[in-house]
Amino acid sequence: MTFFSGMGRFAAGVLRGLGGRSVALAGAAVVLGFLPGVASAQIGSARYAAVVMEPRTGNLLVAANADELRHPASLTKMMTLYMLFDALRAGQIRLDSRLVMTPTAASRPPSKLGLPVGRGITVEQAIYALVTKSANDVASLLGETLGGGDEYRFAQMMTLRARAIGMTRTTFRNASGLPDIEQVTTARDMANLGRRLQQDFPEYYHYFGTRTVVVSGSNLRNHNRMLESYEGVDGIKTGYVDASGFNIVTSARRDNVRLIAAVFGGNSWTERDRHAASLLDQAFAQMGVDGSGRTVMASAAAGAAAATVAARGRR
């Protein structure tokens, strides 16, 4: 069973509900209002941009080119999933609903799950395919489904919803992040999307922390290697196309402090991940948390002016 007819009504409702806001690009960059730190050791690339955001406030602790337009690549799938989670909560679709691969979706280039036309998967399997394999065919299938049979219509819905949640400079043209010169975003916008996924859909956010999973007989491993290499990381998504370089939005929690980093324009995934780790270390230090997840506190014992480090445990 497909959901094009029902999702067509859902898509129309979303487009009406958002009031037909313009999807044109904002004409100027947003001025940074809170910027105590800048990225100290930047990636040598014209595509480079980075931020670290404190999600409770949305303030930036570290930033470089935060509002410059960049290509999102597969970070786009974060918004595709945001829209899917919204449809799930609204009861428009269920985790056990079946999606049937279409010829158009099946024709998308890798990375892909490779399902033949007519083969079905559940919505939950589709979520896993996006957060681990970053499957373009499955993303396109979700776009067709939620857009009432039209992925481009779904991309318009994505853009409108992005603007509604504060992503002021982002425009989507497809559900997968495959190359399109008009598909653009910023490091600030993507960090904000990570923030909103956590805050708006806490019941679904855990999917982004999946390290390995079996979907339709295939063993899938998450492309976000920081889940294994950086203490406290629990998501979110990586991306790459030639125009963007290696991108990542990643979230880490140490002690009671959570931060979200977005890095664009890495020359390799290892360089990107090392840089994201360095920026997170810098931002955690600003928040008073050292590299072991411990909170730095001043000691008042015996009138001493020295500082002591109180270990409060790792999470």
Image (cartoon, helix red, strand yellow):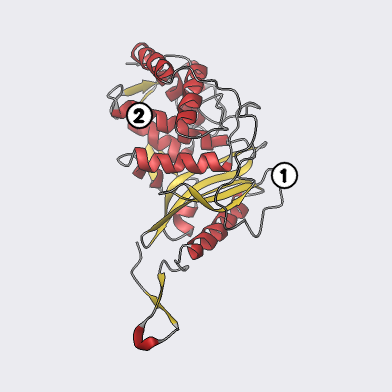
From the viewer's perspective, is 304 left or right of 38?
left
User: What amino acid is at disc 1?
Assistant: Ala
Q: Residues within 10 Å of mark 2 (few under 14, many from 20)?
A: some
Residue in the picture at 33% in, 33% down: 124
Q: Tell me the element at label 1.
A: loop
279 in relation to 76, above or below: below
Query: Where residue 73 sits: x, y (%)?
Result: 58, 35
User: What amino acid is at disc 2?
Assistant: Asp
| Along the line of sight, the residue nearer the viewer: 77 or 156 | 156
Query: Where residue 180 sits: x, y (%)?
Result: 63, 26
- Work out which quarter of the rendered image holds the C terminus and state it: bottom left
42 in relation to 238, above or below: below
| Along the line of sight, the residue nearer the viewer: 266 or 33 | 33
Res. 217 visible in picture = no
Q: What residue does disc 2 label?
A: 86
User: Cα distance, mark 2 to mark 1?
Assistant: 35 Å
Q: Earlier in the sequence, mark 2 or mark 1?
A: 1
Res. 251 visible in picture = yes
Query: Where residue 226 sits: x, y (%)?
Result: 49, 54
